[in-house]
């Protein structure tokens, strides 16, 4: 496997993991908040969501740019950019505060789906 393909796989794996952590934060921490005061503080901490998005931005941005150069397809780019945009909007646009969780979950699912799609394409090429 070429170093370029290995780098692309590592980026996709990191982005998928980060999207999963973001979804866990949004879905599981509110449940834990009912049981643990510390989790309640984390579930309501704005900085946690913003930190995840700020980590996802360069990682996914790099994957999107590389995807556009390697003919990853318009579908991957559209799905990834839309998901990343939703994550950014939910984290940083105050008018979306009331719908932050569903917008975040939708964005994370879209972004993770894009990376999973691209990752599976890399695997298919490798085995072909």
Image: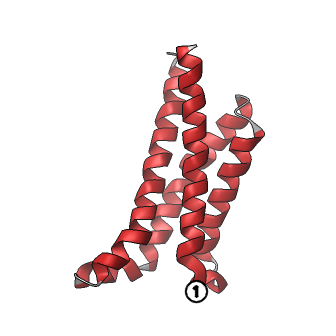
Q: Is residue 8 left or right of residue 78?
A: left
Does dot 1 land on a helix, a strand or a loop? helix
Q: Nearer the viewer, residue 24 or 70?
A: 24
Structural crowding at the residue carrying mark 1, measured as other residues with C-alpha within 10 Å and reported as few (<14), some (14–19) or many (≥20): few
Residue positioned most to the right: 74
The quarter of the displayed image where residue 34 is located: bottom left
The image shows residue 18 at horizontal and vertical percentages of: 45, 53
The image shows residue 126 at horizontal and vertical percentages of: 54, 17
Residue positioned most to the left: 36
Q: Disc 1 designates what residue?
A: 98
Residue appearing at x 74%, y 29% in the figure: 71
The quarter of the displayed image where residue 92 is located: bottom right
Residue appearing at x 39%, y 63% in the figure: 24
Quadrant location of the C terminus in the rendered image:
top right
Q: Is residue 39 left or right of residue 121?
A: left
Q: Is residue 66 left or right of residue 53?
A: right
Asked if 30 appears above or below 8 in the picture, the reply is below
Q: Nearer the viewer, residue 108 or 49?
A: 108
The image shows residue 33 at horizontal and vertical percentages of: 30, 81
Asked if 29 appears above or below 83 in the picture, the reply is below
Residue appearing at x 60%, y 39% in the figure: 117
Q: Is residue 29 left or right of residue 73?
A: left
Asked if 88 appears above or below 10 in the picture, the reply is below
Can residue 42 be seen in this snapshot? Answer: no
Can residue 118 be seen in this snapshot? Answer: yes
Residue appearing at x 46%, y 34% in the figure: 10
């Amino acid at each position: 496997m070429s170093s370029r393909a290995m780098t692309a796989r590592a980026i996709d794996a990191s982005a998928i993991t980060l999207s999963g952590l973001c979804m866990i934060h949004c879905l599981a921490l509110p449940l834990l908040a009912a049981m643990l005061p510390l989790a309640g503080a984390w579930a309501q901490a704005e900085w946690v969501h913003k930190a995840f998005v700020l980590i996802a931005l360069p990682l996914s941005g790099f994957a999107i740019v590389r995807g556009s150069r390697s003919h990853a397809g318009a579908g991957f780019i559209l799905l990834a950019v839309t998901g990343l945009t939703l994550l950014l909007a939910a984290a940083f646009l105050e008018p979306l505060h009331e719908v932050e969780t569903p917008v975040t979950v939708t964005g994370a699912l879209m972004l993770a789906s894009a990376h999973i799609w691209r990752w599976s394409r890399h695997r298919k090429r490798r085995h072909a």
